[in-house]
Amino acid sequence: MSLPRTPKAVVFDMDGLLVDTEVVYREAMIATALHAGRELPNELFLQLIGLSWQANAEILSAHYGAGFEPEPFRVETVRRFHELAEAEVALKAGVLEILDLLDELALPRAIATSSGRDAVNHHIGGHGLLDRFHAIMASGDYARAKPAPDPYLKAAEALGVAPQDCLALEDSHNGVRAASSAGMMTIMVPDLLDPTEEMHTLCVRIARDLHEVEALVRASR
């Protein structure tokens, strides 16, 4: 299966797509919950993937009920995350290869993430890759977080490319919903979340990794 159109730009999610952070966030959040005498089931964590912290806070508060304070929980989770990821967070397979291809094809590219700018600087900057993206849309750079289309629409605007001519790469259900509702050709590269029937409907492809995406982009030229 080929892409429906030749991409004129590529927009990447970050966590779980470019860098292997979701498993680290899960470990940090589980540890924070245990320290407070709570359990954090994997099913609950999976509901949080791809959402803003505000949305996460609402989900966690509904789950834990009265007495749960989201902000101290967030602060402690972030502290534990940075302890675990102090050196650097590993790149996902195929990142360097697809960036090399985009350089070769002179295709602009951006990051559209629910994480903050500090996280982008740490995860992407730690690998010396910040200057390989032409735009970065992080939390605070858009009005509504995923699954709203705003992060992807702002990325397309920053790149000067119509959304329908952009290829969006996502690992989360809410990210796929955001990219698809922005009108972008969307590929899901699953990380912790398996593709559902809805994901197959919204995506032009479910890819096993970024190497497969690289081959698709190359074949579309």
Image (cartoon, rainbow, N blue to C red):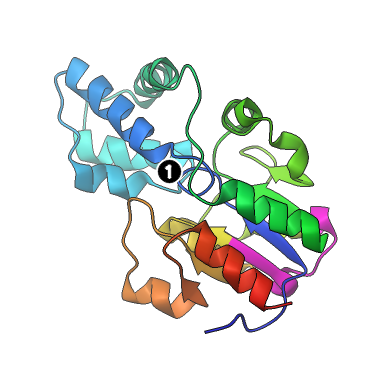
Asked if the stretch drawn in magenta spans residue 49, the answer is no
Q: Which residue is mark 1?
A: 55
In the displayed structure, 53 sits above or below 174; it is above
Which quadrant of the figure has residue 8? bottom right
Position of the C terminus, as image quadrant, is bottom right
On screen, residue 47 versus residue 213, left or right, reads: left
In the displayed structure, 96 sits above or below 219; it is above
Q: Residues within 10 Å of mark 1 (few under 14, many from 20)?
A: some
On screen, residue 152 versus residue 106, left or right, reads: left
In the displayed structure, 204 sits above or below 142; it is below
Percent x, y of residue 125: 66, 29
Q: Which residues are magenta?
A: 157-168
Which quadrant of the figure has residue 189? bottom left
Helix, strand or loop status at disc 1 = helix
Say if residue 197 shows up in the picture.
Answer: yes
Say if residue 143 shows up in the picture.
Answer: no
Query: Which residue is found at the position 44% from the left and 39% from the top?
Result: 20
Q: Count of labels shown?
A: 1
Query: Which residue is found at the position 68% from the left and 30% from the top?
Result: 128
On screen, residue 77 versus residue 140, left or right, reads: left
Residue type at mark 1 is: Ala
Percent x, y of residue 63: 22, 40
